Amino acid sequence: MEAKLTRKVIWNEAARTGIALGAVSVAYIFITYFLDKIPAGAVPGILTMILSFALRIAKIVGCIMILRHAMIKLASDYSEASNRHTYRLGLASSILSALIVAAAYMFHIQFIAMDEILASMDAMMGMMGSMMDHNSLEAAKDMADNLPLASFISVLFYCFVYGWILSAILSANIPAKNPFKDEE
């Protein structure tokens, strides 16, 4: 007897898929960060750029393949799965992975890269400080304090929209539509 496809099943599959998607994206964030920390003389700059580009392509292709595999697996495990079910799986996966990636990026900004960000903002203030009034300087300092939250919200929004669009594209043909199938 085949199990019934329910919302709980979709969310369980989405949790697994979301964790996998989030893990790939978080690994990319930290690998590229530490790749940029390699001293300039140790590795030629062009090699670092090529490796960073290759990692970006691998992340994008890997995320697409993970989501596609999860949708195909859902369609093969449950005969009643429709395009709407695979779309819901993709949408739930994108929400969950977006939360994971946004939290990891906020952690990255707040605890790992904040000193570098503050140093670059101080350098910018030093160059542009004479052109800015006191209120503008205070607003820029407040912006630095709110940067982790702003990065969380923007990454959450970006990842969710990316996953939403990808889910809509991939679920259009998973499962394959059969125009001759008897609909009840």
Image (cartoon, grey):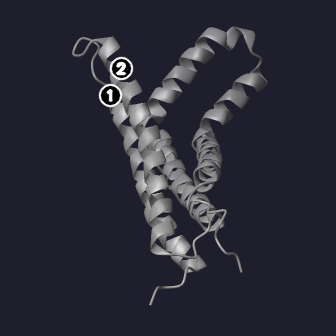
The front one of 7 and 171 is 171
As displayed, is residue 37 above or below residue 143?
above
Q: Is residue 118 left or right of residue 32?
A: right
Image location of residue 32, percent across then percent down = 38, 32
For the point 54% across and 49% down, which residue is it? 102
Image location of residue 90, percent across then percent down = 57, 58
Tell me the quadrant of the picture where the N terminus can be found: bottom left
Which dot marks residue 49? Answer: none
For the point 61% across and 9% down, which residue is it? 127
Q: Earlier in the sequence, mark 2 or mark 1?
A: 1
As displayed, is residue 137 above or below residue 75?
above
Where is mark 1, residue-wise? 35
Q: Quadrant of residue 10?
A: bottom right
Q: Disc 2 vs disc 1: Cβ atoms closer than 8 Å?
A: no
As displayed, is residue 10 above or below residue 66?
below
The residue type indicated by label 1 comes to Leu
Tell me the quadrant of the picture where the C terminus can be found: bottom right
The front one of 98 and 76 is 76
Q: Quadrant of residue 124?
A: top right
Q: Residue furthest left?
A: 42
Which dot marks residue 50? Answer: 2
Image location of residue 47, percent across then percent down = 30, 16
Q: For the residue carrying disc 1, how many other residues have a C-alpha within 10 Å: few (<14), some (14-19), or many (20+)?
A: some
For the point 61% across and 59% down, which residue is it? 91
Q: For the residue carrying disc 2, how many other residues have a C-alpha within 10 Å: few (<14), some (14-19), or many (20+)?
A: few
The front one of 119 and 10 is 10
The residue type indicated by label 2 comes to Ile
